[in-house]
Amino acid sequence: MVVAGRRSGEGRHRGVSFDVADDNAVATGVAEARDLLGGRIDILVNSAGVLSEAPVVEMTPKMWNQTLAVDLTGVFFVCRHVVAEMIERRWGRIINIASQLGIKGAPSMSHYVAAKAGVIGFTKSLALEVAEHNVLANVIAPGPIETAMVAGVSEEWKKAKMRELPLGRFGVVEEVAPSALLLASDPGGNLFVGQTLGPNSGDVMP
C-alpha cells in the first residue's frame, strides 16, 4: 500500500508492505497506513493484483485460489478495514481496479476474469451500502497497460490482444491515473456511484 498525505503544504509518500490476501496482515497494514496519514484514510485505491495464464483444463487449484485471494478477496479485506471509518466521518472515496477482461472475458485467464468480474460486482454492492454516508465506491477497468504484470504474459497473448484493440496499442500508467484522480476529487467525483470507468484502448464499449 502506498499512502500519501500533506502536512505544512509538503507532499509525503510512504510505503506500507503487507499481504492483501491475509486478513490479519491487512488489519496491521491499514493501521500503520492510518498512523502515517495522521489518523485517517480518506481515499482508498485497491490495485494489488497477480496474473497468469492457463486453460481451465490445465489450471491448478493453487493458481485459481491465489488469483482469487489477491485480486478479489484482498479488495474485500482492505475495504472491510477502511470503510467503517469513512462511514463514521461521512466522507470517503473507494476506487477498485478491475480489468476490461472482467467484462468481456479472455481465454486462458478464467481465474483472473472471475476475480475482476467479482471486483466490479462487489463494488456495485458496496456502493449501494455506503453512498448514503457520502462514501463513494467506483471501479476503473483498464485495458492492457504496460506494467510489470502484463510484461509477464506471453508474447503470443500480447500480440493477439494488440490486434483486437481499436486504438492499436496498450496504455501506460499515466493514462489511467487521471481516472483515479477524477473519482477521488471533490466536486469532480461527487456523482460517480458504483460506476466502471474504462480506459481500455477501445477493447470494451459498454
Image (tube, grey):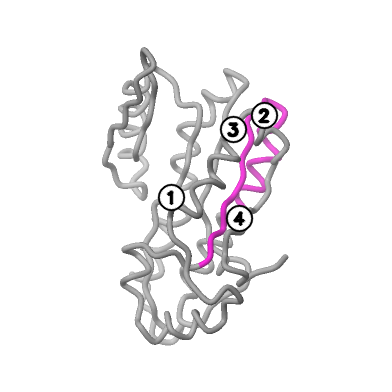
Horizontal and vertical percent position of residue 140: 57, 52
Q: Which residues are magenta?
A: 122-143
The disc at residue 47 is: 1
Q: Amino acid at mark 3?
A: Ser
Horizontal and vertical percent position of residue 103: 62, 67
Viewer-nearest residue: 83 or 151: 151
Q: Nearer the viewer, mark 4 or mark 2?
A: 2
Horizontal and vertical percent position of residue 75: 47, 47
Circle 4: is it few (<14), some (14-19), or many (20+) Cα within 10 Å? many
Q: Nearer the viewer, mark 1 or mark 2?
A: 2
Q: Nearer the viewer, mark 1 or mark 3?
A: 3
Check the image and report above or below for 196 versus 181: below
Q: Amino acid at mark 4?
A: Ile
Residue of label 3? 185
Q: Work out whether mark 4 precedes mark 1 in sequence or the reverse, and give the earlier one.
A: 1
Check the image and report above or below for 161 versus 120: below
Q: Are marks 4 and 2 in contact (CB under 8 Å)?
A: no
Q: Amino acid at mark 2?
A: Pro
Residue of label 2? 187
Circle 2: is it few (<14), some (14-19), or many (20+) Cα within 10 Å? few
> What is the tally of numbered marks visible in this picture?
4
Q: CA distance from mark 1 to mark 2?
A: 23 Å
Q: CA distance from mark 1 to mark 3?
A: 18 Å
Q: CA distance from mark 2 to mark 3?
A: 6 Å
| 38 magenta-colored | no
Residue of label 4? 120
